[in-house]
Image (spheres, rainbow, N blue to C red):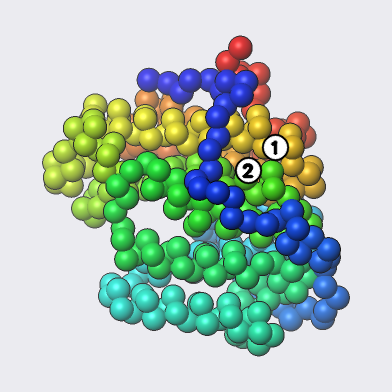
Amino acid sequence: MAFARCPRTAPVRAAGRRAYASATRGAAAGPRPTAPLASRGDIEYCRQLVQQHDYDNYLVSLFTPRLAREAVWGIRAMNIELVHIAETTSSQTAAQMRYTYWINAVNSMYDGHPTQTPILRTVFDATQRFAISRTWLRRLVTEREKALAKPVFDTTRDVEAYGERAYACLIHPHLEALGVRDMHADNAARAIGQATAVMNFTRSLPRLLAQGKCDLPRDLLHKHGVDLADLYANPRPTPSLQEAVFEFATKGYTRLCGVAEIYVPSSPKEGFPALLAAVPVKDWLERLERANFNVFDASLQRHTLKVLWSLWRASRRGSWITSSNIAH
């Protein structure tokens, strides 16, 4: 099994109508002159958190100018805290209380009264410097809360729609921190969010199956005859699981090809450092392909410095698609 190489005009479809007025919303708003609230220690705390728990996107951030990079660290650190709620809270009621805390913290931040924690002081500075939209920060919280309430995805389209909301809202503020509010860049972010969801759901399979859980969409599991009860009892690669993973991963890979061919050339070049979030996703999906879509292959759980090389090359070329990725 292997991915089809990217066609010259790979189709990309974002769910529903485009809901963001990024071409006009806040277009005149530049960095706001305000005394920074976060200390160097606050920023360093966020940096270390992202480096430890979201290493690939930490590497992505290194290709962004300093002040925008610090904004990205704050928002990514906030996302890490939100992810940890579902992973560390045994009671759904307790989890919802923690999500409510974060929603209130976001609202207070935009009312000019940030909660005094390292992460929220750093994010507050980002909102002040770059006019980061409240929509993205609220969505970070609400989408995690919704996923906790309904953890099963029925179709691949459901996963992609979740990716647009839960993962793309990390790329949109990165674009805003770079001064980019553009329709094509927004559409690129949404498609990258779709592919990121596919990668994350696939990469987490070994851990989740051992816990008696599975994030793969139910339609694919049924189509390929995957026996979840058997895999819960004995997590391992099976032909049916590999077929389901192949079809699922191909969706994500196709999204990235389409973004590079259609949206990136039409987006402002100043926003490309934010769109580099696609590179670690593409790199991991290609590693999965080389492992014959066996998610239990130990190499898939390791970080590799090849991602840094791929990021550097993409930043130089202005694209993550090379001639070997394109079907002529």
Q: Are marks 2 and 1 in contact (CB under 8 Å)?
A: yes
Outermost residue to the front: 17
Q: Nearer the viewer, residue 209 or 55?
A: 209
The residue positioned 74% from the left and 34% from the top of the image is 265
For label 1, the residue is 264
Quadrant, the N terminus: top left
Residue 47 found in image quarter? bottom right
Give SS at disc 2. helix
Query: First in sequence: mark 2 or mark 1?
Result: 2
Q: Position of residue 49 (x, y in %)?
A: 56, 64
Residue kind at label 2, given as amino acid type: Ala
Residue kind at label 1, given as amino acid type: Val
Q: Looking at the picture, does residue 99 appear above or below residue 263? A: below
Q: Nearer the viewer, residue 159 or 74?
A: 159
Q: Nearer the viewer, residue 289 or 269?
A: 269
How would you rate the neighbour count of disc 2 (Cα within 10 Å): few for under 14, some for 14-19, many for 20 or more? many
Quadrant, the C terminus: top right
Taking the image as shown, residue 71 lies to the left or right of residue 247, namely right
| Residue 188: assigned label | 2
